[in-house]
Amino acid sequence: MSDRFLTALVMLLLVAGAVYLLRDRIPSPNVSRDRPFVSSNGQRVLPSIDGGPTFEVLSRPGMAGPQYFCAAAEYARSVLRAEMNDVLVTLTAEAPSESSPDHRGVIFELRPAAEKGSIQSGIVIDLSQPGQSRSITVAMTFCR
């Protein structure tokens, strides 16, 4: 094999390795405000307008805090490529949706694990107060 071929092969492997390592941090192009993410429990999740780490989970009749966190966790993992130890925090209480008329919703923010602060645990979630938080790991248990 020639030196040029080996150099090209090494470069190709380096690029492939970088793409493999970064693939989980590339947002999914399939979700938009016109085409929301739908979680396994049927909740619709709308991305932020600016593509940032905030998003809104829309309510359905009979929803409670754990269902909101389940949908938020699935969206964070599938679309935002969050790690299991990252944290979901409610920025708003359950209120009329800011993005979908005739619905109620909760706006969430995804925070890296390094910014944890204090994380709540348990299934009792008071959506009348912003600032509720759960790790992705805990929130995914609500999907079962």
Image: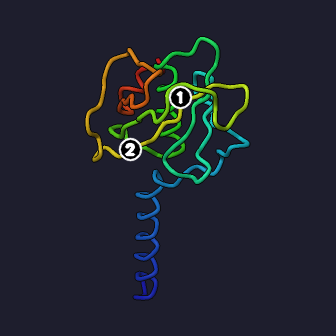
**Which residue lies at the image location 47% right of the left edge and 19% below the top edge?**
65
Furthest residue toward bottom: 3
Location of residue 134 in the rendering, given as x and y in whole percent from the top left corner: 36, 29
Placement of 79 over or under 105, stated as above or below: below
Contact between labelled residues 1 and 2, with CB atoms less than 8 Å apart: no
Q: Tell me the residue that label 2 is attached to.
A: 111
Q: Which residue is mark 1?
A: 71
In the displayed orientation, state which residue is furthest to the top: 62
The three-letter amino acid code for the residue at tag 2 is: Arg
Instruction: Pinpoint residue 57: horizontal percent, then vertical percent.
Output: 57, 31
- Amino acid at the residue labelled 1: Ala
**Total of numbered circles in the picture?**
2
The N terminus lies in quadrant: bottom left
Compare residues 108 and 140 and report the one nearer the observer. 108
Place residue 141 in its image quadrant: top left
Nearer-the-camera pick, 82 or 97: 97
Q: Where on the picture, by quarter, is residue 55?
A: top right
Rendering quarter of residue 21: bottom left
**Disc 2 versus disc 1: distance between alpha carbons?**
16 Å
Residue drawn at x 48%, y 39% is 76
| Above or below: residue 8 compared with residue 97 | below
36 lies left or right of 15: right
Percent from the top left, x then y, of residue 74? 50, 33
Classify 10 Å Cα crowding around label 2: few (below 14), some (14-19), many (20 and above): some
Which of pointers 2 and 1 lies earlier in the amino acid sequence? 1
Which residue sits at x=73%, y=25%? 102
The structure residue drawn at horizontal position 46% and vertical position 41%, both measured from the top left corner, is 109
| Mark toward the viewer: 2 or 1 | 2
Give residue 54's position: percent from left, percent from top.
51, 44
Say which element carries label 2.
strand
Mark number for residue 143?
Answer: none
